[in-house]
Amino acid sequence: MWIKSIIQGRLEFGNAKSYEKVVKMFNYRTENYHKNDILFKEEEIFFEDGFYMDLKRFVGQVTQKSFKNTMDLLGYCAQFAISGSIDGWLTDTGTVLAHSHVEPKSDKAVVQYFQKGKKLVKSEGEQQEAIKHLTKAIEKYNRHAQAYERRAKVNFILKKYHDALRDYNKSIGIDDTNPAAYYGRGKVHMINENWKEAAADFDMATKKSIALQSIYWKARRLKADCHIKLKEYKKAAFDLKLFSNRSFEEDSPNLKWMSAVQFKYGKVLVELEEYEEAIKAFNASIAERSKLDEIPEKEKYFYRGLAKKKAGKNGSIKDIKMAKELGFDNAEKLAAQMA
């Protein structure tokens, strides 16, 4: 049975000795353990000039056995690496059938420092300890793009935005395939109100990730916010429509933003004078409030009423009165001015 597979990622081995050993073992295990039922050849993924493995992005129809063999072998190779990670998915019409993540987990000092720092990044009160471990990983291997990205994340949490930007730049300069680095740098640009730069970084985050990853949709959502700030409503509508039409799993963090995104989509559609579609978006936003939706109901009713009024639909007066009852000051007067 042939199934769609997506595999992408990068591993760095740091020196010639480790690189030569992993290449040798890759070929040995390909032939003797997996009988050449592997999706990649040595010359396709190994790069001696930098002692690393780079899979770019593989998309193809494979058998489950070939996928498992390949991910098992890549997992074995990861134990020779000092940084990086690889992800593989088996999918069927957008449904994930299997997901495999591999990264270095050896007892090498640089790996241990990174793993300890990584675990502490979001631990309240442990940020300084996280920075200490991540800095030690960088000192052991100054091309550790992931350690720079994670340290940037900690600096962002601590509101040290200049330091965060420095580390994100360093991470991207070493490895331009990590969507988290672009996403994080985009958030720094938003803090600094550099909307064009932020939108460009979120766009890169979507290009370096895939729709099966949560970060892809987080970047889409924030990219739309940047386009709204820039009054690029068509671009914002494109991102918000994709997000609004996505069926997220119940445990997806993106689902918590759905009704807020639908409201923003409605407002953008009003700007584009697409009033009937705007009404649909407002209806969806009002019907079920998501966990991270902090938009007052009075605003939702007001803008839906406004969209109905502009579209010549019934119910506009009722919505605007509801907005007024919920505390939207001068709702009727403002609606008349905006008509």
Image (spheres, rainbow, N blue to C red):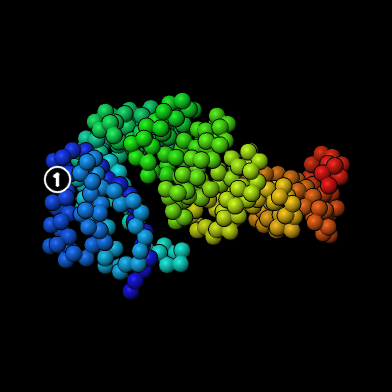
| Residue that mark 1 sits on | 20
* 136 to the left or right of 26: right
* 273 to the left or right of 230: right
Mark 1: few, some, or many residues within 10 Å (few <14, many ≥20)? some
- Is residue 22 visible from the viewing direction of this image? yes
Residue 80: quarter of image: top left
Residue 16 drawn at (x, y percent): 16, 40
Q: Quadrant of the N terminus?
A: bottom left
Give above or below for 143 relative to 214: above
Helix, strand or loop for disc 1: helix
Residue type indicated by callout 1:
Glu
| Tally of numbered discs | 1
Which residue is rendered at x = 21% and y = 53% of the image?
A: 43
* 310 to the left or right of 39: right
Residue 79 drawn at (x, y percent): 21, 47
Which residue is rendered at x = 21% and y = 38% of the image?
A: 14
Residue 273 drawn at (x, y percent): 74, 51
Which residue is rendered at x = 40% and y = 64% of the image?
A: 91
